[in-house]
Image: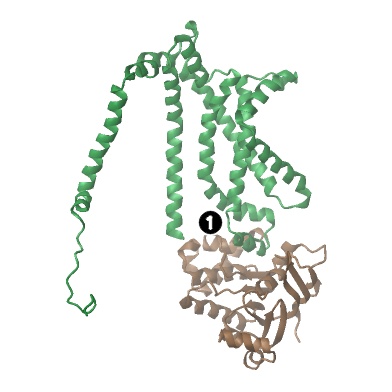
Amino acid sequence: MSEVVLALRDVHKRFKDHAVLTGVSLTLSRHEVVCLIGASGSGKSTLLRCANLLERIDEGDIELFGQSLLDPRVDPDRVRRHIGMVFQSFNLFPHLSVIDNILLGPVHALKRPRAEVRAEAMVLLERIGLAARADDYPDRLSGGQQQRVAIVRSLAMQPSLLLLDEVTSALDPTLVGEVLDLLTDLARQGTTMLVATHEMGFARDVAHRVAFLEGGRVVEEGPARDVLDHPREAATRAFLERVR
Amino acid sequence: MSSALDGERVPPDLFASRRRRLLAGRGGLVASAVSSVVVIGGLAAVFWLAPGGATVRYFFFNPHFMWQAFVGDPSKGFYSVGLGLLTNLWIFAVAEALVLVVGMLIASARLSQSPVLLPFRLLSTAYTDVFRGIPILLVILIIGFGLPELNLGYVSNQSPAVYGCAALVVSYSAYVAEVYRAGVLSIPHGQLLASRSLGLSHGATMRRVILPQAVRTVIPPLLNDLISLQKDTALVSVLGAIETTRAAQIYSSTVFNFSGYAVAAILFLLLTIPMTRFTDHLIARDRARRLAGA
């Protein structure tokens, strides 16, 4: 077993009276891709947001490389510099060009020299075939291109892991493929990823493990093919029937 | 039984009515020219020919009195309405600069997150509530007549125009702070999430992500407030500062003719109309950009 990057232990999260996470436990090891599946409202997004401290959890513990993130000495900004996050709605910064979107984090959060980061960013853009669009503004790009830029933006921080929140759900069906292809490439290169997704094909082909969430808990978890093809739990089976 | 579906097809009549065709293309230009001349010319004729029209022209728009009011003649006991405008202009320039800065400070205090800054959040909320709720005239009277009575040395020895300017800053900062705040709140939450998840602090997120976007949405409403501020410099006249309105008032009560007021009104329009047009232009451009960008 390789090094554990992220561990959630019995995490609870409530919004007012509504309990969203009711005791989630999950670990993510280096080079591992774990897919979170489950109906809308099952807590996938909240789980991801808790993992990089965008939401404060009510109970339980979250560890990054064995360090509890609930320790009062922990600076959330520093934690987030190690954890990339990609959103369903891209959330590129519309007032910044593609290249400036990518440079913002490394230059202003990591305080790295602009020229150096720029060279790296251009290599990343080259890889996704968008180097020629570096100086364009996001509204000039298609949804698929925007989402790939958003993924590169988080990669430019050289994070230890990526959190991906239904990154293809807002895309035109014809554009889903280009984004999934990029994620597949990243998985092959050993990028550690926690992926909330409705793309069962992607989960089957790329994920090492799949966790099925329902009612704010991990109901079933295991190797991707076991969970998706031979679910043990009735709830998992019912969910997979519905999405099939 | 026959219906439109299985019956013989007659090509439907697709032509516009004769009247619609007349108004299309060049016909439309002619139509708008004619209707403008008729409507506006008609109103002008009514104003000119109405009973009492000559009296109105004499009392409000007499060129001789208007010019006399514009240049003024202190030896006859009245001041220049035109020169008075300079006072309005400097009050506006100083107040505008201060309002934009003070408003920003109040808005930042209200939008702050840190627990240490709670008292500033409370104070800034109270400030905007209080000064948006008190008539500006009242604030001008309180500061303009109140401060000189306090015998506070320098603070109590300013000209009425300075007190008026200070009162405008106090009031308008509250309005402008709310405009700034609305602009910041109009930026989608996802922008904040994206920036924070890159590890940028709250302050850096504000500076580099939220404010640059908010400024663009805020400029039209901000200009609207500044147009109001321009006009409200006239309120300073209640303190006795000889600005345009006060000069016009003195003129009318000395010469018993209201043409000075017309001059003051025209001077204000010369200031505000360009700014109003400019604001409309910005709003239209922003709208076009939003429709194009989506």
Looking at the rendering, which quadrant does residue B196 occupy?
Answer: bottom right
Specify whether A228 is left or right of B233.
right
What is the x, y in percent for residue B17? 20, 55
Q: Dot 1 falls on which chain? A: A
Q: Is residue B66 left or right of residue B133?
A: left
Residue A32 in view of the camera: no
Q: Please provide percent x and percent y for residue A76.
A: 74, 63
Residue in the picture at 46% in, 27% down: B268
Chain painted in green in the figure: B
Picture mark count: 1
User: What is the x, y in percent for residue B67?
Assistant: 39, 15
Q: Residues within 10 Å of mark 1 (few under 14, many from 20)?
A: some
Which residue occupies 67% across, 42% down? B106
A17, B291: nearer the viewer: A17
Q: Which hue is chain A drawn in?
A: brown
- The quadrant of the picture occupied by the N terminus of chain B is bottom left
Give the residue pinned by disc 1. A95
Image position, residue B15 (x, y; %): 19, 60
- The figure's colour scheme reads by chain
The image quadrant that residue A191 belongs to is bottom right
Per the image, label 1 sits on a secondary structure element best described as loop
Of A116 and B210, the residue lying toward us = B210
- Give B231 or A61, whichever is nearer the viewer: B231
Q: Is residue A2 visible?
A: yes
Extreme residue in the front direction:
B1
Q: Residue furthest bottom?
A: A230
Residue drawn 63% across the image and 27% down it: B138
Q: Is residue A228 left or right of residue A136?
A: right
What's the residue type where badge 1 is placed?
Answer: His
